């Protein structure tokens, strides 16, 4: 495996405070450049009878049905994630997909495109929070396959109502306010559905979800588990059947 430098865009349209709260670098054009603004892209080189092939690390993970959702949720990310989900389903519809999420959220429209694709395809999509999942990213985390929504032990999860702002004529502002209220109701219904699916169909009313997401609410993995945002906290990858058999064969035998 070797590295080639590739400039990666960071975040737009997300508040500086929220970006920093989750340990991400600053917004473009704000403050001095950070090392995260130019991250080397790992590449893997494989040799076979047919010749040599070079894969970037994310394409190699995609071969294993692993999708990485990292950074701001925007139109570019959404197009990439949706395309990956659709391709993996067309390749093997019955096999599960694992999506690793580390994101401060972003565009609700772009996020809903990912969410709807996750629920539309036949392949079950497992979600894993690594680092942080906030705002729209938290909805994607909660929207994974029932029983297959995970978090690593030191991740942070934040839920809240949609953010937005506009200016212009009073009538235009009213139209925008009505639209963002509809978006809020839609997000609340999605969270209610997945939380009730995890905890029981009548545990949370829509009013309770509305109160829960009224302001920024930061959750530890334990709190997210208790609430129903995730199903399990992962501390170590479980052994495969071959690893278990290997361990049994290596175990000392009684004389």
Image (cartoon, rainbow, N blue to C red):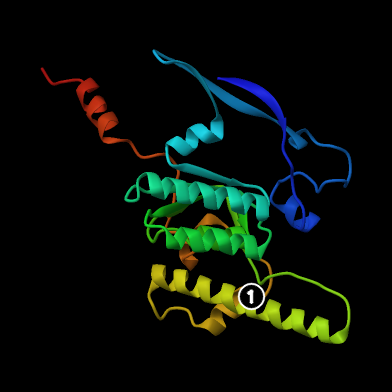
Q: Quadrant of the N terminus?
A: top right
Is residue 100 visible in the rendered image? The answer is: yes
Tell me: residue 93, above or below residue 7. Answer: below
Image: 68 above or below 197: above
Q: Position of residue 174 (x, y in %)?
A: 78, 85
* Percent x, y of residue 76: 66, 50
| Apparent side of residue 77 relative to residue 189 in the rendered image (left or right) | right
Residue indicated by mark 1: 183
Which residue is painted at 38% across and 74% down in the image?
Answer: 200
Helix, strand or loop status at disc 1: helix
Whether residue 142 is visible = no
Query: Camera-side residue: 27 or 195?
Result: 27
Q: Position of residue 205 (x, y in %)?
A: 49, 83
Label 1: few (<14), some or many (≥20) within 10 Å? some
Q: Position of residue 170 (x, y in %)?
A: 86, 86
Q: Is residue 109 left or right of residue 222?
A: right
- Location of residue 198 by image quarter: bottom left
Residue visible at 73% across and 69% down? 163
Residue found at the far front of this picture: 50
């Amino acid at each position: 495996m070797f590295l080639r430098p590739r400039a990666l865009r960071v975040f737009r349209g997300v508040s500086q405070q929220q970006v920093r709260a989750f340990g991400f670098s600053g917004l473009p054009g704000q403050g001095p450049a950070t090392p995260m603004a130019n991250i080397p892209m790992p590449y893997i080189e494989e040799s076979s009878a047919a010749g040599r092939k070079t894969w970037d690390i994310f394409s190699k993970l995609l071969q294993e049905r692993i999708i990485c959702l990292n950074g701001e949720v925007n139109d570019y990310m959404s197009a990439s994630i949706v395309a990956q989900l659709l391709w993996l389903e067309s390749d093997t519809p019955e096999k599960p997909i694992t999506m690793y999420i580390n994101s401060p959220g972003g565009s609700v429209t772009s996020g809903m495109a990912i969410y709807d694709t996750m629920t539309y395809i036949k392949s079950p999509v497992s979600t894993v929070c690594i680092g942080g999942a906030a705002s729209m990213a938290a909805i994607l985390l909660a929207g994974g396959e029932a029983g297959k929504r995970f978090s690593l032990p030191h991740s942070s999860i934040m839920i809240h109502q949609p953010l937005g702002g506009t200016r212009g004529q009073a009538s235009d502002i009213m139209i925008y306010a009505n639209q963002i209220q509809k978006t809020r109701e839609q997000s609340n219904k999605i969270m209610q559905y997945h939380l009730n699916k995890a905890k029981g169909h009548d545990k949370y009313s829509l009013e309770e979800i509305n109160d829960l997401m009224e302001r920024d609410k930061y959750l530890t993995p334990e709190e997210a588990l208790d609430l129903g945002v995730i199903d399990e906290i992962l501390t170590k990858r479980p052994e495969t059947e071959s690893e278990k058999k290997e361990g049994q064969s290596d175990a000392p035998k009684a004389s």
